[in-house]
């Protein structure tokens, strides 16, 4: 059964978690590495579990695994064996499930909310390149090569028992088409497809979000369509464009509003959970049914969503 539809028939909103990597960084982890948060899977998995738990405690109905930048190729380039790489990707699911199950043991945590999901993060090819190209979509690789790249991680995440795949920060329609073709090999698996966007109308490679929504609307395995890790200022318009071109639930989890410099790997600007709360309510009013946060958002931001959503 489609896990998104299953929850939305009883609840109006699915609250996603917030940033993982930048939250790990805030807690003292050094993620300035091509593996990014996937590095912490090998070094300090307990702190990843803590972040997942903190988001559930803040109101999240879904944990997105720490596998965004975890690929077999990436780990091997850092000196890990293929067996170790596979084990670490599996661990990203085990950790998230344990945090979910530990949280859900307490009956008081189950009031007025669904059983939380664990979504297996499938980052784009550009995340593996670690050069910021997930915000450009300009890497030169064929659709078939993209299928081959994504297949091992998808297979590992599915075998580890994720509830759904979070295909996120996808910068091009070509890459999303490759993932959809790959999912035919896993007919009982659902995903949400979430793009990175450059403005009110276009995803990172310049394709109109309306064209993406129109294309993806035909595929049963796509449980939701949306935007993540993009500026909050663009979200309302993008929701409207998706809504006009698809009947599927809309998922949005933008960054905090701060700007990322891919060269220096630093963030600039300011954010506020009060501002984020007002924004998320307006996105819900416009039609988004899965809402959370991406880079630089915190458990406080997710709590601010739960505050208005669970009154």
Image (cartoon, rainbow, N blue to C red):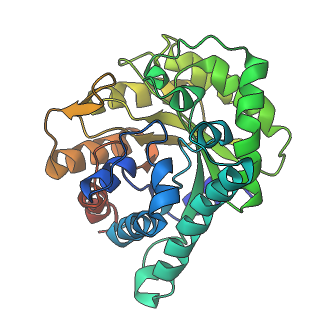
In the rendered image, which quarter contains the C terminus? bottom left
| Residue 163 visible | no
Q: Position of residue 123 (x, y in %)?
A: 56, 37
In screen coordinates, is 16 left or right of 220?
Answer: left
**139 vs 118, nearest the viewer:** 139
Q: Position of residue 262 (x, y in %)?
A: 34, 24
**279 vs 197, nearest the viewer:** 197
Q: What residue lies at 46% left-to-right and 16% top-to-bottom? A: 136
Q: What residue lies at 79% left-to-right and 29% top-to-bottom? A: 181
Asked if residue 174 is positioned above or below residue 217 in the image, the reply reads above
**148 vs 109, nearest the viewer:** 148
In the rendered image, which quarter contains the N terminus? bottom right
Asked if residue 148 is positioned above or below residue 141 in the image, the reply reads below
| Residue 289 visible | yes
In screen coordinates, is 2 left or right of 124?
Answer: right
Count the marks.
0
In screen coordinates, is 219 left or right of 176?
Answer: right
Asked if residue 271 is positioned above or below residue 207 in the image, the reply reads below
Q: Position of residue 247 (x, y in %)?
A: 60, 35
Q: What residue lies at 42% left-to-right and 31% top-to-bottom? A: 239
Q: What residue lies at 23% left-to-right and 34% top-to-bottom? A: 257
Q: Residue furthest front?
A: 79
Residue 143 appears in which quarter of the rendering? top right
Residue 6 appears in which quarter of the rendering? bottom right
Asked if residue 204 is positioned above or below residue 168 in the image, the reply reads above
Q: Position of residue 271 (x, y in %)?
A: 16, 42
**167 vs 288, nearest the viewer:** 167
């Amino acid at each position: 059964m489609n896990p998104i539809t299953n929850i939305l028939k009883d609840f109006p909103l699915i609250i996603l978690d917030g940033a993982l990597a930048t939250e790990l960084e805030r807690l003292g982890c050094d993620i300035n590495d091509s593996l990014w948060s996937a590095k912490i899977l090998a070094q300090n998995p307990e702190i990843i579990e803590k972040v997942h738990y903190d988001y559930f405690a803040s109101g999240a109905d879904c944990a997105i695994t720490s596998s965004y930048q975890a690929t077999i190729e990436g780990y091997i380039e850092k000196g890990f064996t293929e067996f170790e790489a596979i084990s670490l990707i599996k661990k990203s699911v085990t950790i998230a499930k344990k945090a979910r199950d530990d949280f859900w043991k307490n009956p008081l945590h189950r009031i007025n909310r669904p059983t939380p999901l664990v979504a297996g993060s499938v980052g784009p090819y550009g995340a593996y390149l670690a050069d910021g190209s997930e915000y450009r979509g300009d890497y030169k690789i064929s659709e078939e090569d993209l299928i081959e790249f994504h297949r091992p991680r998808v297979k590992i995440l599915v075998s580890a028992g994720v509830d759904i795949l979070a295909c996120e920060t996808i910068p091009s329609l070509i890459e999303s088409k490759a993932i959809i073709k790959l999912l035919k090999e896993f007919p009982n698996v659902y995903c949400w497809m979430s793009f990175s966007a450059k403005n009110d109308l276009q995803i990172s490679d310049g394709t109109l979000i309306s064209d993406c929504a129109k294309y993806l609307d035909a595929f049963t395995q796509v449980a939701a369509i949306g935007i993540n890790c993009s500026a909050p200022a663009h979200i309302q318009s993008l929701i409207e464009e998706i809504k006009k071109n698809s009947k599927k639930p809309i998922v949005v989890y933008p960054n905090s509003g701060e700007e990322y410099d891919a060269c220096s790997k630093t963030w600039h600007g300011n954010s506020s959970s009060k501002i984020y709360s007002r924004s998320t309510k307006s996105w819900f009013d416009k039609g988004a049914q899965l809402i959370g946060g991406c880079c630089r958002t915190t458990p406080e931001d997710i709590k601010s969503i739960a505050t208005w959503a669970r009154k």
